[in-house]
Image (spheres, grey):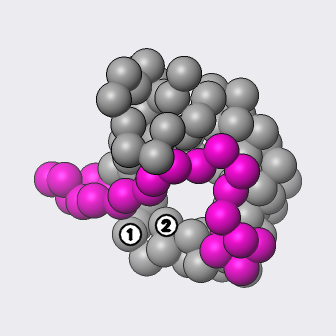
Amino acid sequence: MAILCIQTLPPEVTLDQVQAVTKDLIASGPPAGGISHAVIVDGGQVKIFDVWESEKAMNTFTSERLVPAIQRQMAGMGGDPTSPPPMPEVQVFEAYDAMGA
């Protein structure tokens, strides 16, 4: 079953940082199991809305591609790439009606 994942990033994470990570990720092609992706700014905080074919697909993408991309961006900005990235607030819902699923 498809899922909707909503991530509200910590206030210190900027839209420019998110877009830099996205640019890095796009270079490797679309993620397996990804259906849709949208980024918004709401009240100064970045929110990411993703629809995935399954929670397993989302978790695989996160561990194998997203976290390494964030670590590369942190290193490029002079941060410690071995330290954990700022953690978003994450909500996951079953998506009963998703285009492309």
Residue drawn at (72%, 51%), measured in percent from left and top? 32
Which of these two is toward me, 98 or 90?
Answer: 98
Q: Residue at the location (57% across, 70% down)? A: 22
Identify the residue under disc 2.
Answer: 18
Which quadrant would residue 98 be assigned to in this image? top left
**Within 10 Å of the Cα at label 1, are there few (<14), some (14-19), or many (20+) other Cα atoms?**
some
66 displayed left or right of 51: right
**Nearer the observer, 1 or 9:** 1
Label 2 crowd bin: few (<14), some (14–19), many (20+), radius 10 Å: some
Residue at image coords 43%, 19%: 94
> What's the distance in space between the residues labelled 1 and 2, CA to CA?
5 Å
Q: Which disc number belongs to residue 84?
A: none
Residue 24, percent across and down? Answer: 68, 76
Quick one: 75 or 67, which is closer to the camera?
A: 67
The answer to whether residue 38 is seen in the rendering is yes
Q: Position of residue 38 (x, y in %)?
A: 37, 58
Residue 75 is left or right of residue 48, and the answer is right
Q: Amino acid at mark 2?
A: Val
Q: Are marks 1 and 2 in contact (CB under 8 Å)?
A: yes
Q: Which mark is residue 15?
A: 1
Task: Identify the residue shown where x is 34% and y is 50%.
Answer: 47
Residue type of the residue flagged with mark 1:
Leu
Identify the magenta region.
25-46
In this view of the protein, which residue sits in the foreground, 19 or 72? Answer: 19
Q: Is residue 27 magenta?
A: yes
**Residue 8's spot in the image, x, y percent?**
37, 42
1 shown above or below 88: above
